[in-house]
Image (tube, rainbow, N blue to C red):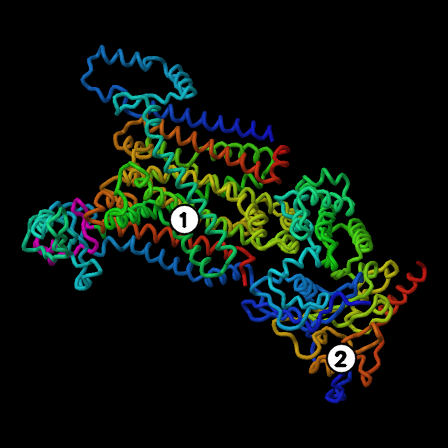
Amino acid sequence: MSKLLEVKDLKVSFNTYNGEVQAVRGVSFDLNKGETLAIVGESGSGKSVTSTTLMGLLPKPHGFVKSGQILFEGEDLVKKSAKEMQEIRGNDIAMVFQDPMSSLNPTMKVGNQIMEGLIKHQNMNRADAKKKATELLELVGIPQPDVRMNQFPHQFSGGMRQRVVIAIALACNPKLLIADEPTTALDVTIQAQILELMKKVQEETNSALIFITHDLGVVANVADRVAVMYAGKVVEVGTVDDIFYNPKHPYTWGLLGSMPTLDSTDEELYAIPGSPPDLLNPPKGDAFAPRNKFALEIDTVMEPPMFKVSDTHYAATWLLHEDAPKIEPPESVKRRMQGFSKMEGEQ
Amino acid sequence: MAANNQNKIPKELLVPLVRKEDTSEKISGPSRTFGQDARRTFFKNKLAVVSVFLIIIIILMSIFGPSMNEHGSDDQDLMRAKMPPHVPVLENISWLGFDGTLSGKYRGDNVEAATANAVARYDNNEEFIDIKVVDEGDGSRNSAVVDATYHIYDAKDMSGEYFWLGTDTLGRDQWTRLWEGTRVSLIIAFVAAVIGLVVGVAYGGIAGFYGGRIDNVMMRIIEILSGIPTLVVVLLMMLVLQPGITSIVIALSITGWTGMARIVRGEVLKLKNQEFVLAARTLGQSDGKVIMKHLLPNISGIIIINTMFTIPDAIFFEAFLSFIGMGIVPPDASLGSLINAGFDNLRLYPYLLVYPAVLISLIMIAFNLIGDGLRDAFDPKMHK
Amino acid sequence: MFRYILRRLFYMLITLFIIATVTFFLMKMLPGSPLSAEDKLSEEQKAIVLEKYGLNDPVPIQYLRYLGGLVKGDLGVSFAFDNTPVTKILMDRMGPSLQLGFQALLIGSFLGIILGLIAAVFRNGAIDYTSTIFAVLGSSIPNFVFAGLLQYVFAVQLNWFPVALWGGFEYSILPTIALMIFPMATAARFIRTEMVEVLNSNFILTARAKGISETGVVFRHGLRNGLIPLITVLGPMAVSMITGSMVIEQIFAIPGIGEQFVTSVTLNDYPTIMGTTLLFAFLFVVIILIIDLLYGLIDPRIRVSGGNN
């Protein structure tokens, strides 16, 4: 399989009044054509910053790429000029944002908002762009698309607006679609519809998808592979099976353990105590150590490297070192893992 | 990339961590109340702080300024009319303009004619006029230019007298009148602001708190009242009332409270359905307690900001009315009436306009900056 | 929307009615009559004049006749200017005031919008700070102070422009500048705040994500959303044009309505004062109505919900 995207040791910082905030501290991952990668983490883990960096939309001048490479089809996006990025954005790489209520221009007709990208990137005239935009609205499941074209965003419900946002992103058949928590702001029932839609259009257009979320439950449904981020780093990466049935990082255990399931009625959820570290002064050693029940002494002095679990599965925890004490995931998480495989068997 | 620097790893540390204390729930940074945050933000705003000091100084001057010299505000004496500013010590630094001289450029066909023009202008007191030739001229019309300086204090044998900011057309001390005028302007602004505050908060509070039909009727009244432009109300009122401080205050207060009432009503309406107010009511708190303890503290910010912005508005309106001759009338002074008088003599005695104009500008800027500072201070987004 | 317009028109009429009524009874309370200027009239002549203006009729009749006259645009006669109809005085002086007002409002808000826009796009830069300082000064310092400064520096000292009076275009330059500083500063300040907010909003991110050029983002997506709220401050700006015109016309001795008003005040010519006040009130109420309707027309969110309210 050919690599569509390779992110190598990406570091992104923000200059603030109080100093430099290291939002992304060396992230590496890759993505094949047509593949779906889920990036999972708490708020503040750097997953959204990673995605805005991919788009070249870091807020200037405060945000900047400190080092690293983003190779998209072999070309480094970090080195591209603002003008070159404009050609790529919306054309090769497109993005779906979190909050559909505020992501659409309130004073512009929905149709025009979809057509803009088409006219810019595909050199279409207005008539063709209009036709294509109507098709797109139909594709994302909006009834009466030709009527809806001439309406304003406030005449759409939240779910409908997110469909419009997806239509805008899909307009130029992007090779890579980034979805930043596209369902978080929606009602649960609408969430499922939007997820179904994203899966469907991805299959139809065969674009690769980076799906950013804090909700592991969503991940199992859409993703091929999962990267777990914590404090600006990828702490564990693997296929969905690796992450759900054989998680190695205590933080992944925590994420899995804090996920309510149907049969978790009488047992306590395994919650992660505390809050993420201050990235203004990132802690020495493993950033997760202060919240980690299974932390080792070495975590306070030295950052763990990525240990290889299998060809597809890596995790950054000293627990994987050959001399480390053998520690098993907590019972509740284990039961959860068994629960996943049971569900898998029933399907 | 996995474990590439195996050798350097201190293997003895690969043992479970023994924690001295639970640090996971530590909260970094001190906790501050909203009021403390607001104060901090305000005092960080240097322009606002400087403005506060400036206003305090101006208020003090408007109280004590008039008694700082022996001249009264209504001591008319045409003998000493239109004297330029004359300040002890500073009189020796000529470019400051406090040396008690009048000066100007005069033109004529030749130097003599230009000089004659200047002398005629300055009471024909040739011996007290210094002439400096700027341009000899070539005999054509108004080609010669002379710089004339008239030592008017010496000419009138008053070199021991000091009118710090000069005198007006009736020989009244401008310094005294300036600060008395400032006092009048400030009193009008503060009283109008306080009346607007009290009436507006009460009216808006009642409408918002009781809601329903009361609110409906009260808001209809406001809707009609605020349809009538303030300017028109003020002009009509000024026609009927005797000109003076009270009239201006009444005229400004008649419609001045509607803006405040609307804002307060909106805020109360928003707050009274919030959980913490419902909780207080569920617990049996009286209406008065709910208003005093829960509603007022939460809308105090917006009330203060609004009041702060009505003060410069009132100052402007007073100055405007006095300027068009409908406000303060002589012998009383206000900044507006002083500026009006200054315009009449702009060509020859610009100092009569400069000081009141600068002072009113400073006051307006300072109040606006304080208002801006307060708005930021009460905005949680601005707290850093 | 239609019901909304009707409701607004209804309120406008009530407001105008109240103002007219108050004005009428104030007139009755104030001293002076068309006769006060002509003391030498004999009793018979006075009676004729009183009869002519219907001043012998009972007050309610006079009131109704006054309202009827208003509807037809009759504002009464001046005490001071040979009993000239007030409407005629005002019409004769409308030109300079309108020209000044429009020049100042249009140029001022246009420059203000540009200034605010530049400040927002390059926020926290040198241009931004300069324009913020200008905006604070311009919206704080009273326009008569500016007028004095301009007149003294550019007319008295430098002789670049006429000191006063009304002639060709060059006579209108200094008054226009003095009058336009307030709308300019207000617009600059307002647009900057709005645009900073708009440019940080999510839909701007969506627009950027489409790969649209930065100019397209700022003008097509940003400016329209930033401009709509500016309509709300058009009201205060229009008022500042009216108060400003009185002061500025007085300072520059321009034969406009404002100057007329100030002259009438000094002459105690009540009918002219009242008539001018009524004209101001009418202008103001109509401007506010137009602004509100315009707001509904431009902002699609209000266009729809307006009908339901």
Residue A246 marker: none
> Do discs 1 and 2 belong to a common subunit?
no
Which secondary structure lies at badge 1? helix
Which secondary structure lies at badge 2? loop
Residue C29, compared with residue A62, is above or below; it is: above
Residue B345 visible, this angle: yes
Q: Quadrant of residue B69?
A: bottom left
- The location of residue A30, given as percent across then percent down, is 76, 68
Residue B319 visible, this angle: no
Chain holding disc 2: B
Crowding at dot 1, Cα within 10 Å, few <14 / some 14-19 / many 20+, comes out as many
Determine which residue is flagged by label 2: B1
The question of residue C188 being in magenta is answered with no
Q: Quadrant of residue A247?
A: bottom right
Which residue is rendered at x = 39% and y = 14% of the image?
Answer: C61
The question of residue B160 being in magenta is answered with yes
Of the residues shown, which amino acid type is indicated by label 2?
Met
Which residue is rendered at x = 94% and y = 59% of the image?
Answer: A346
- The location of residue B199, given as percent across then percent down, is 46, 41
Residue A256, compared with residue B363, is above or below; it is: below
Q: Which residues are magenta?
A: B149-173
Q: Marks 1/2: CA distance?
A: 63 Å
Residue C139 marker: 1
> Disc 1 vs disc 2: which is toward the camera?
2
The quadrant of the picture occupied by the N terminus of chain B is bottom right
**Could you tell whether B66 is left or right of C69 in the image?**
left
Of the residues shown, which amino acid type is indicated by label 1?
Ser
- Magenta span: predominant SS is loop
| Residue at the far right in the pictured view | A346
- B254 or A77, which lies in front? A77
